[in-house]
Amino acid sequence: MSETVNTKPQTYEFQADEATGRLSEAENVSAPDQLSSVEKSDGYEELELPSELKECEENWQSFKTLANQLQLPAETVQRLLDWQAQTLTEGRKISEEVRGQILDKWTAQTKEMLGPCYQKHLTSALSAAQRFGGEELRELLDVTGLGSHPVIIKTFYEISKSISEDRSIGGAARSTTDKTFAEALYGKAD
């Protein structure tokens, strides 16, 4: 005995009750019927996507579909879009302010850690970062703000100190009377 399975996807539409404003399930509608209701022109073509939301354009069609399913007037949809744009702008402004405060705090901690030779030590640290990480690391530190973090500065400052200790600076030239290790051990070969 074989059973027939309906492979057609089922979707549900919701309608707002005009008296209460509550959503209620309308009828069980198949996907093609739903598409025909989305294709209807409800004035959404004239809606203006605010510039703050241009990066969210891929969600724009699904938002219009939802607005259409909820039977929202175009004016209401435009007000929602404007509200979302304003909220996004305010959120970005707050994020930038918080980031600035964090960077200021890190800079103050780094200055305190490095003391009166702050600029000199900072230059050494940044040189080490440039030498070992290249321009890509330097750009990453600048973009993320981690170039101001005390732990990062301290790490690269310690690296710069360790590589400068490996070099002999201004050492006297070797005297002709100085013997090499092999000469001291085996004598001078004639």
Image (cartoon, rainbow, N blue to C red):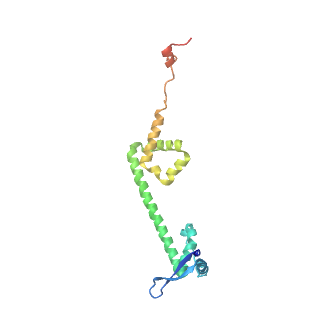
102 horizontally vs 15: left or right: left
Tell me: residue 93, above or below residue 49: above
Q: Residue at x 49, y 26 (%)?
A: 171
The extreme front residue here reads 1
Tell me: residue 92, above or below residue 189: below
Q: Quadrant of the N terminus?
A: bottom right
- Tell me residue 71's x, y (percent): 53, 82
Quadrant of residue 99 in the image?
bottom left
Q: Residue at x 41, y 52 (%)?
A: 106
Tell me: residue 120, above or below residue 81: above
Residue 72 in view here: no
- Tell me residue 188's x, y (percent): 53, 13
Tell me: residue 178, above or below residue 136: above
Question: How many numbered discs?
Answer: 0
The extreme top residue here reads 190
- Tell me residue 97's x, y (percent): 44, 61
Of 42 and 175, which appears nearest the observer? 42
Of 45 and 110, which appears nearest the observer? 45
Quadrant of residue 51 in the image?
bottom right
Quadrant of residue 102 in the image?
bottom left
Q: Residue at x 47, y 39 (%)?
A: 160
Q: Quadrant of the C terminus?
A: top right
- Tell me residue 63's x, y (percent): 54, 74
The extreme bottom residue here reads 19
Residue 163 in view here: yes
Of 107 and 36, which appears nearest the observer? 36
